[in-house]
Amino acid sequence: MITTQGLEKSYKDVKALRGLSFEAKDGEITGLLGPNGAGKTTCLRSIYGLIHADQGTAMVDQIDASQKPLEVRRRIGIFPDKFGLQERLTAREHIAYFAALHGLHGKTGAEAVQKVIDDLGMQDIADRKTAGFSQGQRMKVALGQAIVHQPQNLILDEPSRGLDVMSTRILRELLYSLREQGRCILFSSHVMQEVAALCDRVVIMVAGQVVAEGTPQELCERTGQSSFEEAFVQLIGTEEGIML
Ligand SMILES: Nc1ncnc2c1ncn2[C@@H]1O[C@H](COP(=O)(O)OP(=O)(O)OP(=O)(O)O)[C@@H](O)[C@H]1O
């Protein structure tokens, strides 16, 4: 579970976060939706302990990210937006490297890697060098690296940016299965359709603050709109910086 309470962060005279409070629950996919510059990346970085908020707290499984960043990082998997793979290494070696970074060595490490390979259905590609991998296969390797230490929480910053249709579908199925396992999945996006299709709950943020949150259906009902797109435009007051 991830919660932020009153997060504030300024970069010189730019106020990126202005008292941001929201919750992403276990067993749910929560989408952080907002236009460019809304503060989504700053929020995710505060949760991961990469930046210190000026005020407020980011908690992961009830642990304060600014006070115990290492403990928090053990509980989070980060899905990168670029899959930088070494072509000479196999998929298994890529994932084993991340297992080792998390202190999983020897038999424990090998078992952790095998579990991820099985969970992600990667048996057929596990021992191939990654040179020539399709985008979907590369994405699975990246996700394997993110979850090899079995984190309770998964964070994705703009996950489908640049993904082809097939890879987007694979990612969606993988996220659904992680949700089934009771994990907390938080992702940021400015692509409305993606959020509406994928998320159980949506947190809409503008200029560093939450302006609305709820299920896509609740947000439609609250605004009296039949489409999430119209509801969203009404809630944030503009269409700028948002992709359909
Ligand atoms: N390192 C930095 N130095 C100065 N200003 C920054 C820095 N990082 C972010 N900002 C500013 O803080 C605000 C929020 O940026 P942030 O990247 O968190 O937003 P975002 O919602 O992730 O945007 P996008 O969808 O474009 O990635 C923006 O005005 C941005 O220019």
Image (cartoon, rainbow, N blue to C red):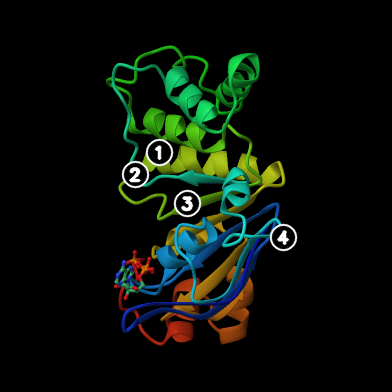
Q: Residue furthest front?
A: 67
Pointer 1 residue: 167
In the drawing, does residue 148 fall left or right of residue 126?
A: right
In the depicted view, which residue is nearer to us: 59 or 153? 59
Q: Residue at x 35, y 71 (%)?
A: 242
Judge the density around disc 2: few (<14), some (14-19), many (≥20) Cα neighbours within 10 Å: some
User: What's the CA distance linking mark 3 and mark 4?
Assistant: 20 Å
Relative depth, front residue between 9 and 24: 9
Label 4 sits on residue: 62
Contact (CB < 8 A) between labels 2 and 1?
A: yes
- Which mark is first along the chain, 3 or 1? 3
Give the spatial CA distance, label 2 vs label 3: 13 Å
Residue 27, given in percent of the width and then of the height, sits at 70, 52
- The disc label shown at residue 156, or none: 3
Question: Does the beta carbon of the residue at mark 3 sit less than 8 Å from ligand 1?
Answer: no
For the residues marked 1 and 4, what is the alpha-carbon distance in whole angstroms? 33 Å
Residue type beneath disc 4: Gln
Front label number (2 vs 3):
3
